[in-house]
């Protein structure tokens, strides 16, 4: 006869030794991700179900987000959980069935960001026609940056270019790309930013499918051109960017117009302007000549009429000379000033008398004035004013405030009645 623990221990040995590592296929249900980072779920098919656990360190390495209804392949070892009398699969690796993990992660993130509106064509901005400073976020040692610099230099030499170096492949590359975009925006004078790298596999280009890069592009102040891989390569960065370029070289062509083409266009525009201005100028010259003749004839009559009007206005001006009015206003001002000075002097004198009377009344009410007439004020050491003999006892210390100075005294005896005869 076996105890439950003994039987479970034997079963545990058989199960864990027989199935140390295996792949299991099934549909996910009851997926739960807890605060500690561990995930618990069930793998099931038509006839059975199996409990499974994916611990935090493995969960963080997944490229996609597991969820109910997904058909997955799980690799791990069977483990017997004696306390509950159950067995579960401790998962080491999790892969989607049919669709690769990276492709599934790509589709999941694409759907989520699209739902947020990050791919909306209405939020995309046009590239500046003549950028003065261009930012490039890429690997400084890659072929892509050399291609872009060569194309820009050939099309429009002398432009200012800032390269924000970052890794474009491997663990942590997405965070570096996002930081490079933020650094370029932080300069404040970058007109357009190119983000990209050369071609590669889906794994090589994965940094440009990370959410941190997508949000950095969406939050950029300057318009962003995505130039990742070859024309057939599509990344999340392409959907979020303001403009998608087929290749890094194509991105440089989109950002920088060819200098000679600009010069030719300006020269053609200058010629059209010259032709367009020459005809109106000739017509205007004829009109000016005719106007000059009419103006000369009309000028003589206008001059005579103007001279006559000036003479009339001059006579009126002398009759209403402003100097006479100015003298009259000056006298009125001087009389008003004299009245104001007298009024201020009377009010000042009255205020001075009222102030003196108030000071006299205040002085008569001052306790110091009473002390000056020979009276004194007695206080106990704690500052209490002594009004009756019963407030102190023989031997108590008191302070006597005089008109000038203070006496420190000690009580020898007390009397409740004054020694003075009553009248």
Image: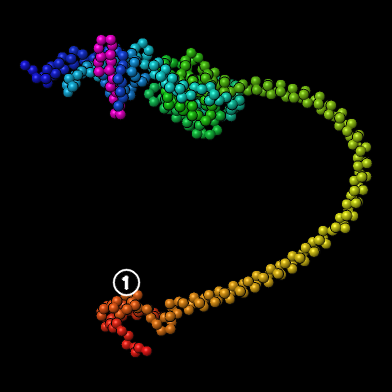
Check disc 1 and report the residue beneath it.
Answer: 382
Q: Is residue 312 above or below residue 136?
A: below
Please state which of residues 32 and 254 is positioned toward the viewer in this rendering: 32
At horizontal 46% and vertical 28% (from top left) the residue drawn is: 216
Please state which of residues 321 and 413 is positioned toward the viewer in this rendering: 413
Would residue 290 be found to the left or right of residue 12 on screen?
right
Would residue 356 be found to the left or right of residue 76 on screen?
right
At horizontal 91% and vertical 34% (from top left) the residue drawn is: 293
At horizontal 57% and vertical 21% (from top left) the residue drawn is: 254
At horizontal 45% and vertical 76% (from top left) the residue drawn is: 366
Please state which of residues 48 and 187 is positioned toward the viewer in this rendering: 48
| Residue 164 visible, this orientation | no
The quadrant holding residue 21 is top left
On-image quarter of the N terminus: top left
**Callout count:** 1
On-image quarter of the C terminus: bottom left
Q: Is residue 353 covered in magenta?
A: no
The image's colouring method is: rainbow
Circle 1: element type: loop
Label 1 Cα crowd, 10 Å radius (few <14 / some 14-19 / many 20+): few
Q: Is residue 37 covered in magenta?
A: yes
Q: Is residue 372 above or below residue 81?
A: below
Q: Position of residue 123 (x, y in %)?
A: 53, 25
Q: Position of residue 409 (x, y in %)?
A: 31, 80
Q: Which portion, as a residue range, is magenta?
A: 35-51
């Amino acid at each position: 006869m076996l105890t439950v623990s003994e039987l479970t221990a034997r079963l545990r040995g058989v199960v864990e030794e027989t199935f140390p590592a295996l792949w299991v296929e099934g549909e996910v249900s009851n997926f739960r991700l807890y605060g500690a980072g561990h995930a618990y779920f069930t793998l099931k098919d038509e006839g059975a179900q199996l409990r499974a656990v994916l611990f935090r360190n493995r969960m963080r390495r997944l490229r996609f987000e597991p969820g109910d209804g997904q058909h997955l392949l799980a690799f791990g070892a069977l483990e017997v959980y004696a306390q509950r009398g159950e067995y579960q699969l401790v998962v080491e690796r999790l892969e989607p069935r049919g669709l690769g993990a990276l492709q599934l992660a790509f589709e999941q993130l694409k759907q989520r960001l699209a739902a947020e509106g990050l791919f909306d064509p209405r939020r995309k901005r046009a590239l500046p026609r003549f950028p003065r400073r261009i930012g490039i976020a890429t690997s400084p040692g890659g072929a892509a940056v050399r291609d872009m610099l060569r194309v820009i230099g050939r099309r429009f030499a002398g432009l200012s270019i800032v390269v924000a170096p970052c890794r474009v492949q491997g663990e942590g590359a997405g965070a570096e790309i996002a930081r490079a975009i933020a650094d370029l925006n932080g300069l404040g004078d970058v007109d357009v930013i190119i983000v990209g790298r050369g071609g590669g596999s889906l794994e090589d280009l994965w940094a440009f499918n990370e959410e941190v890069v997508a949000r950095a592009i969406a939050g950029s102040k300057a318009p962003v051109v995505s130039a990742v891989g070859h024309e057939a390569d599509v990344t999340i960065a392409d959907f979020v960017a303001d403009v998608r370029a087929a290749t890094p070289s194509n991105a440089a062509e989109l950002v920088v117009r060819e200098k000679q083409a600009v010069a030719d266009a300006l020269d053609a525009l200058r010629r059209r302007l010259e032709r367009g201005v020459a005809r109106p100028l000739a017509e205007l010259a004829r009109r000016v000549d005719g106007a000059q003749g009419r103006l000369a004839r009309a000028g003589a009559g206008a001059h005579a009429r103007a001279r006559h009007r000036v003479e009339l206005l001059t006579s009126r001006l002398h009759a209403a000379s402003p100097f006479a009015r100015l003298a009259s206003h000056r006298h009125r001002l001087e009389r008003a000033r004299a009245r104001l000075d007298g009024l201020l002097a009377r009010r000042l004198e009255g205020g001075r008398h009222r102030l003196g009377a108030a000071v006299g009344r205040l002085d008569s009410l001052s306790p110091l004035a009473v002390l000056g007439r020979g009276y004194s004020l007695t206080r106990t050491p704690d500052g209490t004013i002594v009004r009756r003999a019963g407030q102190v006892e023989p031997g108590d210390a008191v302070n006597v405030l005089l008109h000038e100075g203070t006496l420190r005294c000690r009580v020898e005896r007390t009397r409740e009645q004054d020694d003075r005869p009553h009248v």
